[in-house]
């Protein structure tokens, strides 16, 4: 029942997903992890700029924006909107 991981860039607005893995290493990988985007964390896409770059995410209790070239390094598994999860 697990869906195939996709790039974060491809999630539509108002969708939820769980981070599966990061393809970035070095300084960029460290920056992405420092922002809280680590495997297992749940995110919600809350908006996009008019030209679809950057993307705004809700992670934990804050909003984070990423450029699409950064989002391309983050693989996520989309979550269904009807599932109830405990926090």
Image (cartoon, rainbow, N blue to C red):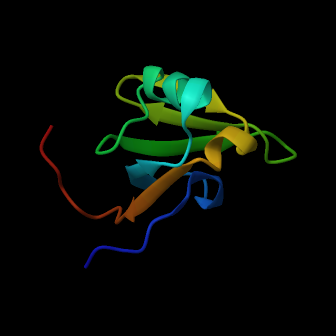
Q: Looking at the picture, tell me which residue is in the foreground, 50 or 33.
A: 33
Q: Residue at x 74, y 43 (%)?
A: 69
Name, please, the residue furthest toward the front: 26
Instruction: Reply above or below: 79 against 33.
Output: below
Name the quadrant of the N terminus: bottom left
Instruction: Reply above or below: 52 against 38.
Output: below
Name the quadrant of the C terminus: top left
Residue 64 seen from this side = no
Q: Residue at x 47, y 33 (%)?
A: 58
In percent of width and height, residue 67 lies at 73, 36
Name, please, the residue furthest toward the right: 51
Classify residue 5 by image quadrant.
Answer: bottom left
Q: Would you say 71 lies left or right of 50 here? A: left
In percent of width and height, residue 73 lies at 59, 47
Q: Looking at the picture, tell me which residue is in the foreground, 26 or 59.
A: 26
Q: Looking at the picture, tell me which residue is in the foreground, 61 or 2.
A: 2
Q: Residue at x 29, y 73 (%)?
A: 2
Q: Residue at x 79, y 39 (%)?
A: 49
């Amino acid at each position: 029942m697990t869906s195939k991981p996709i790039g974060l860039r491809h999630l539509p607005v108002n969708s939820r997903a769980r981070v599966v893995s990061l393809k970035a290493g070095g300084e960029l990988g460290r920056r992405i992890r420092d922002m809280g985007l680590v495997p297992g964390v749940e995110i919600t896409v809350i908006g996009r700029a008019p030209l679809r770059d950057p993307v705004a995410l809700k992670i934990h209790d804050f909003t984070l924006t990423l450029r699409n070239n950064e989002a391309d390094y983050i693989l996520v598994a989309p979550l269904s909107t009807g599932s109830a999860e405990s926090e």
